[in-house]
Image: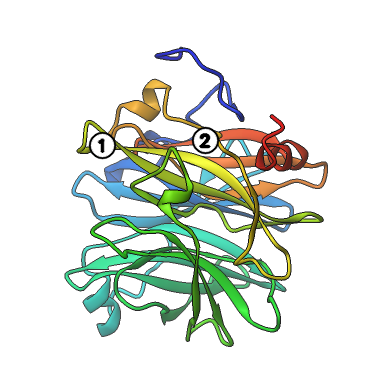
């Protein structure tokens, strides 16, 4: 039941949330499941869940599904490089918000890490979803929300990211790399001042979706309510295929707002946040999003509808 009226531009799954802390083994004392990455592998949906236990210890945990709705966790979380001295130094507080991009036969997991040295972007790769290679940190301090494009652009890897150009805020940027490790040629592609409903910060959500008309980018935008309360919403825009620093079109309204109880009430109230989408062959788009930094949810749209939203035709 919605707390207040008003139709969002995309449709929630009627039985949200699709994953909660209670879906994981009791001995791990999981408290939260949210902001998870998603991909397909060997005909199955694989969701890499962001989890926290009751002591706020983080985990990345793979769940599997035949239909993209009903997920079953594996027996245990994936192993992290906790003994590596560089990891210990720069991921000592938290790691979170995994975004998955397939390029060729490799799957890249770009995510944020937090330590006393601020936030940095980290990168893993896998080919079989059993063994994971940590490739290291791939940003300077003060950057997060890295979302890797699914193909090279003009011979270079490309990603969206969000340098924190002001305290806990910032705009959306685009960066390039020849090797996925060293990044540069950075340019700002969206400012908070560009989005009327997100004056606090804007950043990438899921990795971009390639369409004939451009790169679809389902992003997050944040505004403040009563000066101190953040409200996280989702938006959509369209980037030029050859030059993704150029935004062709952008929906004037948010496409999803926190209005359900599980989006309004949780450890971080008033949050909907995506780190992964699946674009199906039939044009359907499954948008996986976290509610209130507590539960994992699902919404639906189509490529055609999202493109129409970008041009403000819906």
- The residue shown at (47%, 45%) is 195
Label 2: few (<14), some (14–19) or many (≥20) C-alpha neighbours in 10 Å: many
Q: Give SS at disc 1.
A: loop
Depicted 57 relative to depicted 124: above or below: above
Q: Give SS at disc 2.
A: loop
Q: Point out residue 46 in the picture as x, y percentages from the top left corner.
A: 59, 52
Depicted 122 relative to depicted 20: above or below: below
Q: Nearer the viewer, residue 139 or 174?
A: 174
- The residue shown at (43%, 47%) is 35
- The residue shown at (46%, 65%) is 161
Q: Point out residue 228 in the picture as x, y percentages from the top left corner.
A: 20, 38
> In the rendered image, which quarter is residue 88 located in?
bottom left
> In the rendered image, which quarter is residue 236 located in?
top right
Whether residue 313 is visible to the viewer of this picture, yes or no, is yes
Q: Point out residue 277 in the picture as x, y percentages from the top left corner.
A: 61, 48
Q: Give the CA separation, mark 2 to mark 1.
A: 22 Å
Circle 2/circle 1 CB separation < 8 Å: no
Q: Earlier in the sequence, mark 2 or mark 1?
A: 2
Depicted 179 relative to depicted 261: above or below: below
Q: Which mark is residue 267?
A: 1
- The residue shown at (35%, 40%) is 223
Q: Point out residue 265 in the picture as x, y percentages from the top left corner.
A: 30, 27
In the picture of the structure, the residue carrying the numbered disc 2 is 254
Q: Which mark is residue 96?
A: none
Label 1: few (<14), some (14–19) or many (≥20) C-alpha neighbours in 10 Å: some
Whether residue 132 is visible to the viewer of this picture, yes or no, is no
Q: Is residue 6 left or right of residue 249?
A: left
> In the rendered image, which quarter is residue 152 located in?
bottom right
Q: Is residue 82 left or right of residue 133?
A: left
Depicted 266 relative to depicted 217: above or below: above
Disc nearest the viewer among 2 and 1: 2
């Amino acid at each position: 039941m919605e707390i207040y009226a008003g139709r969002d531009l995309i449709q929630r799954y009627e039985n949200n949330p699709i994953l909660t802390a209670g879906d994981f083994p009791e001995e791990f004392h999981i408290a939260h499941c949210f902001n998870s990455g998603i991909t397909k592998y060997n005909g199955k949906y694989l969701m890499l869940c962001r989890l926290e236990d009751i002591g706020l210890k983080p985990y990345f945990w793979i769940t599997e599904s035949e239909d993209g709705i009903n997920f079953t966790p594996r027996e245990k979380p994936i192993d992290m490089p906790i003994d590596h001295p560089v990891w210990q130094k720069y991921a000592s507080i938290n790691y979170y918000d995994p975004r998955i991009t397939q390029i060729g036969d490799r799957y890249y997991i770009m995510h944020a890490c937090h330590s006393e040295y601020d936030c940095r972007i980290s990168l893993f790769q896998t080919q079989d979803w059993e063994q994971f290679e940590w490739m290291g940190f791939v940003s300077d301090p003060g950057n997060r929300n890295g979302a890797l494009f699914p193909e090279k652009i003009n011979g270079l890897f490309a990603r969206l990211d969000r340098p924190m150009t002001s305290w806990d805020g910032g705009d959306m940027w685009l960066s390039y790399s020849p090797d996925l490790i060293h990044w540069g040629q950075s340019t700002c592609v969206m400012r908070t001042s560009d989005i009327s409903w997100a004056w606090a910060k804007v950043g990438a959500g899921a990795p971009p979706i390639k369409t004939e008309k451009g790169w679809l980018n389902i992003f997050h935008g944040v505004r403040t309510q009563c000066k101190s309360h953040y409200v996280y919403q989702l938006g959509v825009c369209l980037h030029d295929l050859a030059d993704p620093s150029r935004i062709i079109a952008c929906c004037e309204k948010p496409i999803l707002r926190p209005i359900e109880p599980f989006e309004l009430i949780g450890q971080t109230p008033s949050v909907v946040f995506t780190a992964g989408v699946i674009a199906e062959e039939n044009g359907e788009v499954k948008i996986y999003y976290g509610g209130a930094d507590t539960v994992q949810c699902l919404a639906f749209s189509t490529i055609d509808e999202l493109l129409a939203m970008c041009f403000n035709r819906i």
